[in-house]
Image (cartoon, helix red, strand yellow):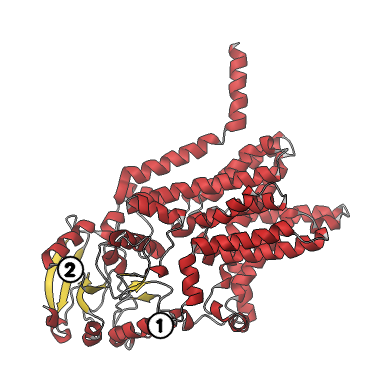
Amino acid sequence: MRGLSQQKWFIWLTRYWFLFPIAGFLLLTAGVFVGFGEQSYIAVHDNMDLFLAQYQMLKNTGSFWKHGVDVPFLGGISRDNLPSELSLYSMLYMLFPTYLAYVLGIIGKILLGMFSFRLLARELYPDRYQTYRPMIYMVGFAYGIIWFFPAFGFAFASIPLCVYLLIKIYRQQGKRWYLALFAYPLVSYFSYHGIFLLGYLAIAVIWLSIRDRKPAKSLIAALFVLAAGYVACEYRLFGQMLFSDEVTIRSTMVNPSLTVAEVLQESLEVWKNGIFHADGVHGKVILPVCLLYFVVQNLSYLLQKQWKRIFHDPFNFVMLFLAFNSLIYGLYDFEPLRSLVETLVPPLQGWQFNRTIFFNPFLWYCALFLILIRLYDRGRAALWAANIIICIAVLAVILTPTRYNDLFATCYNHVRSTEIDEYNYEQFYATELFEQIKEDIGYDGEWSVAYGMHPAVLEYNGIATLDGYLGFYSQQYKEAFRKIIAPALERVEASRIYYDDWGARAYLYSGTDESVVSSAKTVYATDRTLYMDTEAFQELGGQYIFSRIEISNTEELGLAQAGVYTAQDGSCTVYVYQCEGNR
């Protein structure tokens, strides 16, 4: 009996071994972020300097559901420019404190990616699901833990869910799937994924209608349902795009203009390495495995005189899709094509159609999955080889310090013995320090700017800012703010190009360094002179400057020091200045 019990236990482990690494990682992730709390090290770029501050602003002002109101940054812009409230990710920030919402977003993204992949794989391989189950879960898990752009992690992770729903609809398995598809945009994002999903769906409708020799009516209906879902969930975005006559900074953004050779080189680069907003770390394990399999499998077809199978192999289709998305990324910087798109569809001026690259992580993991399940079909030795490959791929994602790998950054910074210059979450926003500052200076909503730090720090702490970071705001305001920073831009050509040709970061710039905005404890400034037009600052209502650099020319600028404040742990010192005329 004892031997039989051990045999059953071994069989159970063989079937469900994948539960241990998945559960272990989820417990580790929760333990690290809950255990360290706000002393965790969270990525700043396009994250703490952008979306986290915006969600906190919406929370501070109670503006998640409001209409016809402005939010207090960039001189006051429409709430409609910020993320929709009809988003599962936004709802986390409505319900929970900002840091906790961020952590729940990480864990939710992992679960969403894993279970979405499981649903899709089970739909495609119903008869072999029990056999493939370990690989289905592990590939879905690997895809789910990719350190995607945090604010849109749900949108990345849920791509297989959308494909699953469309397959259900195509196979006409009930009208309820249309309702599920209509609700899908709650976990997606139109500008990054939705518009491309609709485009891919339109192509699928045409192709399937030709192949089946009859209109793909179910998918045609799905196209309209999905589009309606995006309009409903992101009605604010559509209102701004379609019904606002405001000229935005998108109209003056300057993009690179590459030669054909440079386009091909850039396409190859993103094919190999991906893009930091969606770094799947595929180049370490998945790409070499896929390339080796691609060569061996297709050579085998040729040697066996089965060359037609090359054009029917789903793996080859996925590899072609990867190449297509990478090529589109490069072609975005080919000016004749970009100008053609903007001419044919003027509302899309400034629209980044190269975001097809955001689908490549999903495709790389699909390609790997196809290889691994084929190994599963080749016997026990090949099966365990597949298990080893996916485990190595998972470890590569976990242990590679990519831009948004907050788990690695937090663990590494808490165990290393050298002094840490990076800010953790608590130090970056320094809420206790700014509460003290606001109380001491009697702050009452006056317009302010940051110098040597991201304006997001002020926004997070309930301070209204004339500066800020947003990729979609009024061109008129960009020009008005430019008057404030004109003295600095005239002295540093790189800063002038950065602001005039892009402008999403309306910051105070240095007149000597390319940047003095620091996300770390150390601020690198070769000159403490602030080059700013105080009169233009006051014309926009500016009163306070919160600076991490002690400004040397305050008298010349007509500024008076309102106080010097240092955080209790010494990680940050803030110099507060006020315009003399406003004292």
What is the secondary structure assignment of the residue under circle 2? Answer: loop
The vertical placement of 11 against 122, above or below, is above
The vertical placement of 478 against 137, above or below, is below
The vertical placement of 392 against 512, above or below, is above
Structural crowding at the residue carrying mark 2, measured as other residues with C-alpha within 10 Å and reported as few (<14), some (14–19) or many (≥20):
few
Closer to the camera in the image, 371 or 300: 371
Quarter of the image where the C terminus is located: bottom left
Visible residue check, residue 392: no
The amino acid type of the residue labelled 1 equals Gln
Q: Position of residue 143 (x, y in %)?
A: 55, 50
Give the left or right position of residue 196, taking residue 154 as reference.
Answer: right
Closer to the camera in the image, 174 or 119: 174
Q: Position of residue 443 (x, y in %)?
A: 16, 68
Give the left or right position of residue 36, taking residue 179 as reference.
Answer: left
Identify the residue at the far top of this view.
1
Visible residue check, residue 510: yes
At 48% from the left edge and 54% from the top edge, which residue is drawn? 147
The residue under label 1 is: 475
Quarter of the image where the N terminus is located: top right
Q: Position of residue 333 (x, y in %)?
A: 57, 78
Q: Earlier in the sequence, mark 2 or mark 1?
A: 2
The residue under label 2 is: 444
Give the left or right position of residue 286, taking residue 399 as reference.
Answer: right
Q: Nearer the viewer, mark 2 or mark 1?
A: 2
Closer to the camera in the image, 225 or 23: 225
Q: Image quadrant of residue 442?
A: bottom left
